[in-house]
């Protein structure tokens, strides 16, 4: 049963006056050559598809590599200018500018900090891409809200906490229990 499934049937039609073994041999040879050409063409098409996909993957890898080389987040002004986009800036007079970095990373902003020379209270210029103006304003709003919360919620100092606990202990020691021993009944 399995031999029947594995066998192939080939139908070949030849027109001729007298069919000899050499004519049949030539016809089969021609058929096999055409079959081989068809198979080779199919493999060439497959190889072309593979190389096309490989080239496409290579291009995509190169593009990703270039994107990885572009700096993100905090960078120098030179790096921002190298990206070929228009820059905008905002003046800030905050000493704790480092905490802005966390908010900027959250919003995915490419920016650069430049400290103004000669300003008595330190002033900073924040340069960023002009297309990120809306994102930058949202980030500054959040940053300003965080800074206000920090200023409003003042934690009591550790020294004051210690002083209060010492006072409580002192009051506790003043209330020493007085024991009265009594023998017998009082009348």
Image (spheres, rainbow, N blue to C red):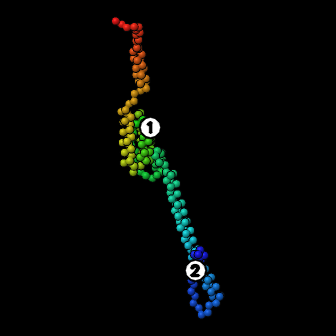
* Relative image position of residue 165 (x, y in whole percent): 42, 22
On the image, numbered disc 1 is attached to which residue?
117
Q: Nearer the viewer, residue 15 or 155?
A: 15
Residue at 42% of width from left, 19% of height from top?
Answer: 169
Q: Position of residue 79 (x, y in %)?
A: 48, 48
Q: Position of residue 148 (x, y in %)?
A: 36, 36
Q: Say which of 111 and 61 sits in front.
A: 61
Q: Eyeballing the image, is 69 above or below 152?
A: below
Near-viewer residue (10 or 59): 10
Q: Hey, which residue is sitting farthest right in the picture?
A: 22
Whole-Å distance between the Cαs marked 1 and 2?
A: 91 Å
Q: Is residue 186 left or right of residue 53?
A: left
Which residue lies under the disc numbered 2?
9
Q: Residue furthest left?
A: 187
Numbered disc in front, either 1 or 2: 2
Q: Quadrant of residue 147?
A: top left
Position of residue 112 in the picture relative to residue 42 (left or right): left
Q: Residue at x 42, y 35 (%)?
A: 95
142 or 94: nearer the viewer: 142
Q: Residue furthest bottom?
A: 17
Residue 57 position in % (x across, y down): 52, 60
Q: Is residue 77 visible?
A: no
Label 2 Cα neighbours within 10 Å, binned few <14 / some 14-19 / many ≥20: few
Decide: few, some or many residues near mark 1? Use Cα within 10 Å; few <14, some 14-19, many ≥20. few
């Amino acid at each position: 049963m399995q031999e029947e499934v594995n066998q192939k049937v080939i139908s070949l039609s030849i027109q001729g006056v007298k069919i000899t073994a050499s004519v049949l041999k030539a016809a089969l040879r021609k058929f096999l050559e055409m079959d081989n050409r068809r198979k080779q063409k199919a493999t060439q098409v497959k190889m072309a598809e593979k190389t096309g996909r490989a080239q496409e993957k290579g291009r995509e890898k190169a593009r990703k590599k270039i994107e990885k080389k572009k700096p993100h987040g905090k960078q120098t002004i030179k790096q921002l200018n190298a990206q070929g986009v228009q820059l905008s800036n905002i003046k800030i007079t905050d000493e704790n500018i480092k905490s802005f970095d966390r908010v900027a990373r959250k919003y995915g902003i490419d920016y650069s900090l430049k400290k103004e020379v000669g300003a008595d209270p330190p002033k900073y210029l924040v340069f960023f891409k002009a297309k990120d103006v809306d994102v930058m304003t949202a980030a500054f709003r959040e940053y300003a809200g965080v800074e206000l919360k920090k200023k409003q919620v003042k934690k009591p100092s550790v020294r004051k906490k210690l002083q209060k606990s010492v006072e409580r202990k002192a009051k506790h020691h003043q209330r020493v229990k007085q024991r009265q021993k009594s023998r017998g009944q009082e009348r």
